Image: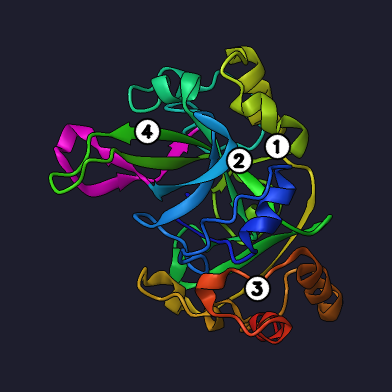
Amino acid sequence: MCGRYTLVSSIRVVEEHFQLPESGGLVQFEGVNAGPGLPMPVWNSADVSQLTLMNFGFESQWAGSTKRLLFNARSEGDHNADDDPRYRGALGIFSKPSFRSAIRSRRCLVPADTFIEGPKTERLNRPYCLFPTDPPGIFAMAALWQEYPPAPDSQFPRTGFALITTAARGIVSEIGHHRAPVVLHPSHYRDWLNPDTSVQQLSEILYSGDMREWNAYPIDPRVKSPSQHGPELMRAIGPMLHPVEQTRIEKSWIVKGFGFNKSLKSGGYGMQSSLFT
């Protein structure tokens, strides 16, 4: 599953990645250690003209409580119980009661700079930061969104999103985890948000994924705590899985805007270096 990710690029960089006009908003959010319950930027099918904030996680409608959040949705549903990465059968998400309506009409994209995962048994007790390297930069995870009635003390409805996952391949399987978020290729962004895209097309998109090369390095287990948001959490505490020139990776992130989310009170390029040295 994927319950943590990072978005510290500026909103303008995210908007440019999605080819959206400049909005001038959504600058305040905890993007270093984004986890269930936190409001984060998404690009959703209800308003494709701009980014909006949604809470990470679906509320548990059957439990009558917001305490338990569904933050992942298995693309295979109840199929592929062994998490075989070669599975190409039916995608049960289209029939699962929790998600069958959302997958047809309420889809969204969740921008990220990295996502955080650990081995299947140790999980976030031994976390890794995973990121694309070729090409580097922002990526978008396939997700679903849901709207809920306003809270008793508010007049505005609540919205939440859940990341779609698939059987792990590549870098995620290398760190020993069995599930991975579905990362979409930019050429599929508009089709994913288009309400007229067929079930067959959606299935093909979910199976295609983003074919970029990825890398990973171990980070501080304190990231397991949802209350921890300091940029020091993302410093490497060990070598990268695939050796690369560290300065080249840092430079590419600086060019893309990594480190300029205003909510982090960044110090410009200096903070960028402090994240990955």
Badge 2 or badge 4: first in the primary sequence: 4
Which of the labelled discs sits on residue 35, or is there none? Answer: none
Mark in front: 1 vs 4: 4
Q: Magenta residues: mostly which secondary structure?
A: strand
State which tag comes first along the sequence, 2 or 3: 2
| Residue with the mark numbered 4 | 146
Which mark is first along the chain, 4 or 3?
Answer: 4
Query: Residue 209 got which mark?
Result: 1
Element under disc 2: loop
Give residue 253's position: percent from left, percent from top. Answer: 76, 69
Q: Amino acid at mark 4?
A: Gln
Q: Which residues are magenta?
A: 57-74
How far is the residue under mark 2 from the one under mark 4?
18 Å
Residue 173 in view in this figure: yes
Query: Distance between the Cα atoms at labels 1 and 3?
Result: 26 Å
Disc 3 from disc 4: Cα separation: 30 Å
> Is label 1 in a helix, a strand or a loop?
loop
Q: Residue at x 62, y 62 (%)?
A: 175
Give the amino acid type for the residue marked by disc 2 in the picture.
Val
Please rate how many residues cluster around mark 3, counting C-alpha atoms within 10 Å: few if below 14, some from 14 to 19, many from 20. many
Q: Position of residue 246 (x, y in %)?
A: 81, 79
Q: Which image quarter holds the C terminus?
A: bottom right
Which callout, 1 or 4, points at the residue further toward the start of the chain? Answer: 4
Report if residue 122 is visible in the image: no
Residues marked 2 and 1 touching at CB (< 8 Å): yes
Residue named by callout 3: 259
What kind of colouring is applied to the model shown?
rainbow
Specify whether residue 72 is painted magenta. Answer: yes
Residue type at mark 3?
Gly
